[in-house]
Each structure stands twice: as C-alpha cells, then as structure tokens.
Image: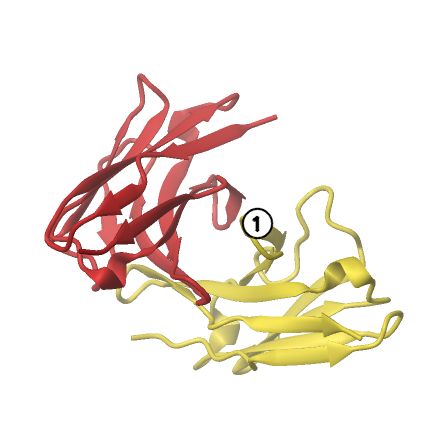
Chain colours: A yellow, B red
Amino acid sequence: SYVLTQSPSVSVAPGQTARISCGGDSIESKSVHWFQQEPGQAPVLVVYDDTDRPSGIPERFSGSNSGNTATLTISRVEAGDDADYYCQVWDSRREHWVFGGGTKLTVL
Amino acid sequence: EVQMLESGGGLAQPGGSLRLSCAVSRLTFTSYAMSWVRQAPGKGLEWVSDISGSGGATYYADSVKGRFTISRDNSKNTLYLQMNSLTVEDTAVYYCARRKRTAFEGWGQGTLVTVSS
C-alpha cells in the first residue's frame, strides 16, 4: 500500500518560516492535500492539489510537490499556527485515501 | 454556512454494533462525495470509507472492510456508517468529510465511539 512519511515534529520561532515535508514514492504524480488540526478540533483544509489554497486560508500557507517529497510552507509563522499538520493523497491503485502520520508544529 | 453534524457515537461492547449519522445542510448534497475519517485517542487521522455523490460507488479501508458499511440518503441529506463486529481498535473520534472534487473541503466536529467491555 502507498505510504506517506512525515517528520513527527517541527519547531520554529514566530516570524520565521516552517517547512513540513511529506514523503512518498513518486508523490509528484499525485495531488497532495494538507490539513491543519488544532487540539480538540476537526481538521481544516489549508492546501489542496499541491499548491492551491481554499478561500479564507492566508497566503502565508503554500505548497509544493516534486520528486518524492511534497512540502507545506508556512511563512511568517504565528502562535496560532501551532497545530498538527497532515498530508493526504488518493492511492488510485488501491482506491484508498491515505494520510501521512502527521507533524506537530511547535511555535517557540 | 454549511453544517455537518455527526451523531450516533457512544459506548459499545466488543462484537457489538453502532450506526453513525452525518446530517448535512446548506449545500447540494448530491454534488459531494462523502467520507468517514477516524482518529484514535492521541493518534493521527485514518481514512475509513468513501461514497460517491449518487451512492453508487463505495470504498473501504482494509481495517474495516467486511465489518463497516457506508451509505447515504440523498433525500435526507444524510450520510451513514453502519459499524458491526466492533473491536477495541475501532475506538476513535469519527468525522464525516465532504469532497466536491479532489479534497476534503469540509469536516464535521466528530462523534466519539468507545468500544469497551
């Protein structure tokens, strides 16, 4: 089955740039979606189809996808960005949705 | 604003059954595929099942295939998950999520399922 690998944690100071990676075999051939989840809350879509942002999501959130790694970049990090982040793809071979294990972003 | 409200969670015994519902309002329900996603306590997100807008296509994670059944009543704007042969590993918050094209653009607040003797 298709596996998405995320680093368990990333730490960044306010105002700096956070980069959260999502690794998968030839992931560049898939559309990657990213979700933010604050404690006790439902996930929120922040980037879809590798690079697009839903309405209401700040421009500080951006995505890229190349080779075997997709990346969510959060610029000018704020305290409110402290949350868990998950990547997701559709595994067309098995007709399954797949989530990465999640990355805890800590704003120092 | 779109509303998605899950219900039906609670305590079940191992081997028991529960039926979850997700009532959706303020959108054209048939335009959206729907999924169930769960999250065990302290763990990450796990996709459970997906159903097309018409209900004609369904998909299941290996961990629930043969035990869970996803369905929808488009006349009632409601999504269901029938869960049978429950095990302690099914303990989780269950979320419903909607998808118009490729991404899960909206989620409910979740309902907690606890499987314990």
- In which image quadrant can residue A64 be found? bottom right
**Quarter where residue A46 is shown:** bottom right
Which type of secondary structure does the marked residue at label 1 adopt? loop
* A35 relative to B100 in the view: left or right: right
> Residue A104 at x, y = what percent?
61, 72
A46 relative to B29, above or below = below
- Which amino acid, by three-letter code, is at mark 1? Gln
Which residue, given by chain and number where applicable, does mark 1 sit on? A41
At 52% from the left and 70% from the top, the residue drawn is A102
Residue A78, image x and y in percent?
83, 62
Give x and y (percent) for residue A16: 86, 74
Q: Residue furthest top?
A: B75
Query: Quarter holding the N terminus of chain A?
Result: bottom left
Q: Residue at x 73, y 49 (%)?
A: A57
Residue B114 visible, this orientation: yes
Is the C terminus of chain A in the top left, top right, bottom left or bottom right quadrant?
Answer: bottom right
Number of callouts: 1
Question: Taking B96 as reference, is A74 left or right?
Answer: right
Bin the neighbour count of mark 1 within 10 Å (Cα to Cα): few under 14, some 14-19, many 20 and up. Answer: few
Residue A32 relative to residue B14: left or right: right
Q: Is residue A82 above or below residue B113?
A: below
Question: Can residue B61 be seen in this snapshot?
Answer: no
Which chain hosts label 1? Answer: A
When asked about the image quadrant of residue A56, the answer is top right
Vertical arrangement, residue A94 with respect to residue A38, above or below = below
Q: Residue at x 59, y 57 (%)?
A: A39
